[in-house]
């Protein structure tokens, strides 16, 4: 097959991944009438170029955060969601903050909360907490460092978590499956589930454009989630479906554009 045809096929594969949310090697092999070995080479090349992520038996799109990783500013939506979520935190609460840019956006809103005890699995979250004037008590999970999520994971972290109990967990998501719950590209989901088990309230912070995204890895099901905080881009239909699952929905007011 010519180089031109290979490039065209890979371009189509990239488009299919973004449109469908997940593609399988077998389906692509049938579509292009080529071997699974060739398709695997295509996926490897596309992943190397930073256009998708390979998963067992196929591929998925890159997380939205990957595209904006070079951007150091926090989006207005993330800031608004974090401010809304912080309203749930009372003084002297014991809270868990999972790794992620949206959850990290909570930290500036904690400065007026006295007596907080905060545990996290993320170094950047811990470092930002150290800068707060109200000096919350900071706990780290420890564990094995995962460069993909930039956080500590694994059995050690899970054992440490089980030694505590918390009022609230604040956690993000790569996607929201309206039928199942929160979904993620990260296959290390054990710690998130232990976090949810150890908290009386589980509060998910997620931008509305992630609602309905099809991602294979289920992280938390709706029965484990207390509240979802998002922006005004969420549809009324999505709100009804989430509330039907027994989850409260808080919608953050977006700042007005000049």
Image: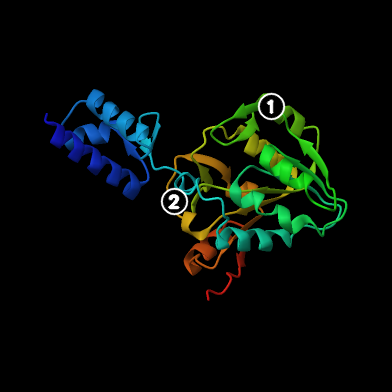
Question: Who's the residue at 83% across and 57% down the image?
Answer: 113
Q: Splitting the image into 4 quarters, where does residue 21 fall? A: top left
In this orientation, which residue lies closer to the viewer: 211 or 5? 5
Say if mark 2 contacts mark 1, CB within 8 Å. Answer: no
Q: Describe the element under mark 1 as helix, strand or loop.
A: loop
Q: Splitting the image into 4 quarters, where does residue 48 fall? A: top left
Q: Distance between the residues labelled 2 and 1?
A: 30 Å
Lower sequence index among marks 2 and 1: 1
For this view, does 103 lie left or right of residue 27? right
- Looking at the rendered image, the quarter that the N terminus falls into is top left
Q: How crowded is mark 2: few (under 14 residues within 10 Å), some or many (20 or more)?
A: some
Residue found at the far left of this picture: 2
Q: Where is residue 211 in the image (x, y as percent from the top left)?
A: 48, 56
Q: Describe the element under mark 2 as helix, strand or loop.
A: loop
Q: Mark 1 points at which residue?
A: 143
Q: Splitting the image into 4 quarters, where does residue 79 fall? A: bottom right
Question: Who's the residue at 46% across and 48% down the image?
Answer: 64
Q: Where is residue 157 in the image (x, y as percent from the top left)?
A: 70, 29
Q: Position of residue 221 (x, y in %)?
A: 57, 45
Q: Name the residue under label 2.
A: 213
Q: Where is residue 247 in the image (x, y as percent from the top left)?
A: 62, 57
Q: How crowded is mark 1: few (under 14 residues within 10 Å), some or many (20 or more)?
A: some
> Tell me, what colour scheme is on the image?
rainbow
Say above or below: 79 vs 31.
below
Residue found at the far top of this picture: 37
Q: Can residue 122 be seen in this view?
A: no
Question: Who's the residue at 61% across and 33% down the image?
Answer: 190
In this orientation, which residue lies closer to the viewer: 128 or 9? 128
Which disc number belongs to residue 220? none
For this view, does 219 lie left or right of residue 107? left
Q: Can residue 187 be seen in this view?
A: yes
Comparing labels 2 and 1, the label whose residue is closer to the camera: 1
């Amino acid at each position: 097959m010519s180089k031109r045809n290979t490039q065209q096929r890979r371009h189509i594969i990239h488009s299919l991944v973004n449109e469908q949310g997940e593609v399988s090697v077998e389906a692509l092999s049938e579509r292009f009438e080529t071997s699974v070995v060739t398709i695997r080479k295509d996926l490897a090349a596309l992943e190397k170029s930073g256009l998708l992520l390979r998963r067992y038996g196929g591929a998925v799109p890159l997380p939205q955060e990957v595209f904006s990783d070079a951007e150091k500013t926090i989006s207005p939506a993330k800031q608004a969601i974090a401010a809304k979520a912080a309203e749930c935190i009372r003084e002297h609460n014991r809270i868990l903050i999972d790794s992620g840019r949206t959850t990290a956006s909570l930290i500036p809103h904690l400065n007026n909360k006295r007596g907080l005890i905060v545990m996290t699995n993320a170094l950047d979250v811990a470092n930002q907490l150290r800068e707060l004037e109200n000096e919350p008590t900071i706990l780290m999970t420890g564990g094995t460092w995962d460069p993909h999520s930039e956080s500590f994971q694994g059995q050690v972290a899970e054992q440490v978590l089980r030694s505590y109990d918390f009022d609230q967990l604040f956690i993000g998501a790569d996607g929201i499956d309206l039928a199942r719950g929160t979904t993620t590209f990260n296959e290390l989901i054990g710690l998130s589930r232990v976090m949810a088990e150890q908290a009386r309230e589980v509060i998910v912070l997620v931008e509305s454009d992630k609602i309905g995204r099809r991602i294979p890895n289920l992280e938390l099901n709706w029965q484990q989630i207390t509240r979802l905080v998002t922006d005004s881009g969420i549809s009324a239909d999505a709100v009804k479906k989430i509330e039907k699952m027994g989850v409260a929905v808080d919608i953050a007011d977006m700042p007005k554009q000049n």
